[in-house]
Amino acid sequence: MDPVTREPTDYALWDRHEWQARGECWLWCGRDDVEVTWIGPVRSSGMHAALYACRACLYELDQRVLEINMREDVGGLPNHR
């Protein structure tokens, strides 16, 4: 948080995550040997794995989540159910 404006800083999102030195992004870019963070477990066809994302893909995911939440807040129909 900016101490004067009380607004989140550009890095506020990233401060919430524990970034690992290098790994594979499992989201859109699919890059390997990139800084990643664990974002949760994933289940597919009855199997489980740890899901990791890089900063760029996590930003895209956060934007999608924000958009759907804003849409629901104004009474719009969610498109994810």
Image (tube, rainbow, N blue to C red):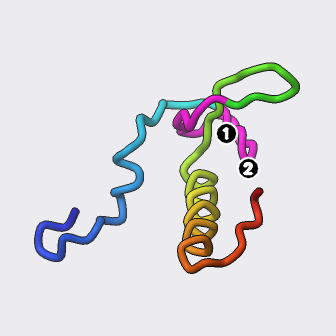
Q: Is residue 78 above or below residue 40?
A: below
Q: Quadrant of residue 52?
A: top right
Q: Which mark, residue 63?
A: none
Q: Quadrant of residue 23?
A: top right
Most distant residue in the top direction: 47
Q: Amino acid at mark 1?
A: Cys
> Magenta residues, as a range?
24-41
In the picture of the structure, the residue carrying the numbered disc 1 is: 25
Mark 2 neighbour class, 10 Å CA radius: few under 14, some 14 to 19, many 20 or more: few
For the point 29% across and 66% down, the residue is 8
Seen from the viewer's position, the closer of residues 61 and 30 is: 61
In the picture of the structure, the residue carrying the numbered disc 2 is: 29
Residue 3 percent across, percent down from the top left: 12, 67
Most distant residue in the left direction: 4
Q: Is residue 58 above or below residue 79?
A: above
For the point 75% across and 28% down, the residue is 43
